[in-house]
Amino acid sequence: MHCERLSADGMVLDFSDIKREVRAVCAEMHERTLVPMRSDVVSVSEAVAERFGQEVTLLCDGGAARYVLPKADCCCLPLVHTTAEELAAHILGRLLGALRPALLQRGCREIEVAVSESPGQEAVCSLALEPPDLGSPSRLSNENLRAQDLAVVDAVADAGAVAVALATSLDH
């Protein structure tokens, strides 16, 4: 989080709020196969199987390879690829949706998320936060922010409106 000033309580934002949201996002992905639902190279379908319940089927190489997984073991994400770059943008969007009102109230102007593949290899996604043009500060309600948040989260998920930088260590 990048802020212009500390709040009266001496904090940028309460880290317990950030941790709660990060843990929730990570818990959805932990110990699951990450499935890119918008993939341009893997066809993904969901179905209900008689014996096993809900399944996710992945067709690769034009259907030459077929993988069927229990849906409970999958985390279906609105991504094209499950790269560190797209994961960073996705996580940023999720955090922004949950924390944006608090960030704006505390004067934060930028949020940044890094996803590490290994030591020295990470993707960083950052987004400048601009207060919505809603007139007086009293109109900065959660309801007014939700519509804007949804548009920003979609833009982040599409990775078209954010700066994504890949920092790769030269010594690997």
Image (cartoon, rainbow, N blue to C red):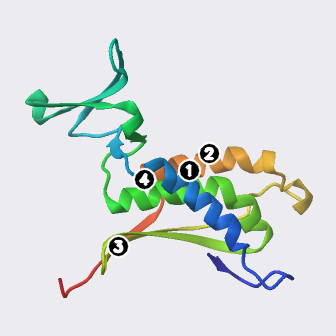
The local crowd at label 1, few if under 14, some if 14 to 19, many if 20 or more residues have their Cα within 10 Å, is: many
Q: Horizontally, is 172 left or right of 102 in the view?
A: left
Q: Answer yes or no: do the residues labelled 1 and 2 have beta carbons within 8 Å?
A: yes
* Spatial separation of the CA atoms under disc 2 and disc 3: 26 Å
Indicate left or right for 10 with 160 as reference: right
Q: Position of residue 72 (x, y in %)?
A: 41, 34
Q: Measure the C-alpha gap from mark 4 to mark 2.
A: 25 Å
Dividing the picture into quarters, in which one does residue 44 lie?
A: top left
Q: Which mark is residue 153?
A: 1
- Comes first in the chain, label 1 or label 3: 3
For marks 2 and 3 on the same chain, the one whose residue lies earlier in the sequence: 3
Q: Which residue bears the numbered disc 2? A: 150
Using the rendered image of the protein, determine whether residue 129 is visible from the camera's viewpoint: no
Single out the residue that lies furthest toward the left: 64
The image shows residue 112, relative to residue 143, as above or below, that is below
Query: Which residue type carries mark 4?
Result: His
Q: Mark 2 or mark 4, which is nearer the start of the sequence?
A: 4
Q: Are marks 3 and 4 in contact (CB under 8 Å)?
A: no
Q: Position of residue 149 (x, y in %)?
A: 65, 50
Disc 1 vs disc 3: which is toward the camera?
3
- Camera-near label (1 vs 4) is 4
| Quadrant in the picture for residue 66 | top left
Q: Which residue is mark 3?
A: 122
Q: Nearer the viewer, mark 3 or mark 4?
A: 4
The vertical placement of 9 against 30, above or below, is below
